[in-house]
Amino acid sequence: MATIDGLPPLREVIQTHDLVAKKALGQNFLLDMNLTAKIARMAGDLTACDVLEVGPGPGGLTRGLLVEGARRVLAIEKDPRCIAALMEIAAVYPNRLSVLNADALTVDAGALLTPPIRVIANLPYNVGTELLIRWLSPAIWPPFWQSLTLMFQKEVAERIVARPKTDHYGRLALLAQWRCDAKIVMHLPPEAFTPAPKVHSAVVHLTRLDAPRFEANFNVLQRITAMAFNQRRKMLRSSLKGLHPNIEGLLTACEIPPTARAEEISLQQFCSLSRAFAAA
Ligand code: SAM
């Protein structure tokens, strides 16, 4: 069967290179090239961008990125079995695909690419959240990337875009929305993947803001949200008791009811409390 890029169908690639999926590496592959090209389009115009892809596997999304015109793709894959298949793609797109056989957690990818840079990936479930937190927490903002278009388990995607007073609202939503616009752009059922995972998935698109939405010190904000959400059902005057001897006064000065719970407090209010705490 013909493919949109003339390369062999992904099922054939998997057979040829004997890429039996390994659960420990979070391997759930996308084999439909129309779908991978659609995910690439969700990231916006790629023609003037370098793209970082983590976990290319047999290369379905990688091929989608190249078909959609990415200027250059750096694909970091931990599984050495996938490298030969990826090098076959690189041969068809001279100077546009670099493949690195490495653990993405150990690579300073920003240093290897030329801005503007977009990160686009169907992330391995076991390191996906850790990578996202790292990309959202660099020492200097703005970060090396312009946008992140990332596949997660649906539940993680909902935690990233969650609003106050909802079950999924917590530290991940606050961190993501403090520094980015974040939205879910696609939902995928388990059958979209081979092998099919147990859960549904979703693609989240995050666009960085030039500066955080509200002023706050990163470390202070992290400390306060950690304390507040570690005991999310408790009133703030109790969960934040160890933060300051007069926590009730601090909360009241920020117009936050001391009896409110973490999940009721907006990003703006958490930032305001961070500033008040830093000043105190
Ligand atoms: N992008 C492919 C697709 O959409 O079909 C594969 C996605 S699969 C969910 C995740 C991929 O990440 C696998 O190929 C796995 O080997 C790779 N991987 C797992 N941990 C990794 C790590 N720490 N660094 C780089 N790649 C990793």
Image (cartoon, rainbow, N blue to C red):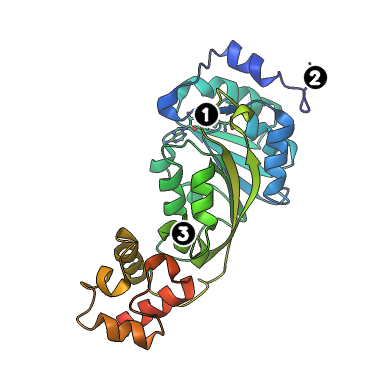
Q: Residues within 10 Å of mark 1 (few under 14, many from 20)?
A: some
Q: Name the residue that disc number 1 marks.
A: 197
For the C terminus, the image quarter is bottom left
Q: Is residue 71 shown left or right of residue 131?
A: right
The answer to whether the residue labelled 3 contacts the one labelled 1, judged by CB atoms less than 8 Å apart, is no
Residue type at tag 2: Ala
Q: Is residue 2 left or right of residue 139?
A: right
Depth-wise, is mark 1 or mark 2 nearer the camera? 1
Q: Is residue 278 above or below residue 224?
A: below
Instruction: Give coordinates of residue 7: x percent, y percent.
Output: 72, 21
User: How many neighbours does mark 3 have within 10 angstroms: few (below 14), some (14-19), or many (20 or more)?
Assistant: many
Q: Earlier in the sequence, mark 1 or mark 2?
A: 2
Q: Of the residues tagged 2 and 3, which is closer to the observer?
A: 3
Type of residue at label 3? Tyr
Q: Please, is residue 228 above or below residue 27 in the view?
A: below
| Residue placed under numbered mark 3 in the picture | 169
Q: Position of residue 260 (x, y in %)?
A: 37, 73
Q: Earlier in the sequence, mark 3 or mark 1?
A: 3
Screen quadrant of the N terminus = top right
Dots 2 and 3: beta carbons under 8 Å? no
Identified at 44% across, 69% down, the residue is: 264
Q: Secondary structure at mark 2?
A: loop
Residue 137 found in image quarter: bottom left
User: Which SS class for mark 1?
Assistant: loop
Q: Which residue is mark 2?
A: 2
